[in-house]
Amino acid sequence: MDFEQLVKPVYPELLRYARAMAGSVSDGDDLLQTALIKGWRGLKSLRDEAGFKVWMLRILRNTYRSQKRKKWLRNLVSLEAVGDKAADTSLPFEEKEAVRLALQGLPAQQREAVVLFEVLGLSVNEVASVQKASPSAVKSRLSRGRAKLRERYLALTEEETGHEGKIAQAS
């Protein structure tokens, strides 16, 4: 197995995930580099090349948690760091900022599930594999996370503008 060939097609997703979890571009880049080194060193333990993306996401997650425990990272998540996914929306800056702030307020497992599912487009089963949880636990995290995200977003947009934002009106 050639590590570079396995990484190349999933690198953009790994980068977005790392940056979203770390909370900034530079911290996310550092997190990804650390995880890639761990992945490269542990490549012999990968049993199925088809599961490489989920395997690397799990390494990224574990690396992030380890660093967080050591208090190396202070920020939680930033949608501006998500990259192309956030840039593709037609939301004005103020609404993107409200979404970012709302996402920051979610509990870590819910935020992670929402980012993996909604931003990276992983299936519920893939998210479950990354989070080492059952699919029903992931569905619950997604449901609660979306509800809290919507509630926080509405509160933030009403607070700043005195009315609901475009996302709230469209739902």
Image (cartoon, rainbow, N blue to C red):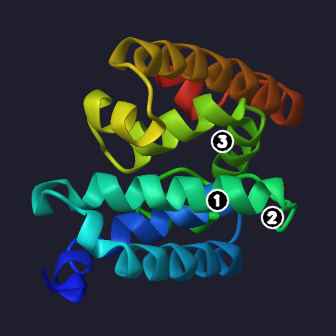
Q: Position of residue 75 (x, y in %)?
A: 81, 58
In terms of depth relative to the viewer, which is nearer, 90 or 107? 107
> Where is mark 2, residue-wise?
73
Residue at the location (60% across, 29% down)? Answer: 110
Residue position marked by numbered label 1 in the rendering: 64
Q: Nearer the viewer, mark 2 or mark 3?
A: 2
Q: Can residue 162 be seen in this snapshot?
A: yes
96 left or right of 87 in image: right
Name the residue type under label 3.
Val
Above or below residue 165? Residue 87 is below
Question: Which residue is most to the front?
Answer: 44
**How dense is the environment of label 2, judged by Cα within 10 Å: few (below 14), some, or many (20 and up)?**
some
Mark 2 residue type: Leu
Q: Quadrant of the N terminus?
A: bottom left
- Callout 3 crowding tier (Cα within 10 Å): few <14, some 14–19, many ≥20: many
Above or below 169: residue 48 = below
Badge 3 marks a residue whose secondary structure is: helix
Q: What separation in Å lies between label 2 and label 1 (alpha carbons)? A: 8 Å
Label 1 sits on what residue type? Tyr
State whether residue 152 is above or below residue 56: above
Please report whichever mark, 2 or 3, sits nearer to the chain's N-terminal start: 2
Q: Secondary structure at mark 2?
A: loop
- The earlier-in-sequence mark between 1 and 3 is 1
Q: Position of residue 141 (x, y in %)?
A: 53, 20
Q: Residue at x 25, y 72 (%)?
A: 44
Q: CA distance from mark 1 to mark 3?
A: 22 Å
Residues marked 2 and 1 touching at CB (< 8 Å):
yes
Q: Counting residues from the N terminus, which is met first, the one under dot 2 or under dot 1? A: 1
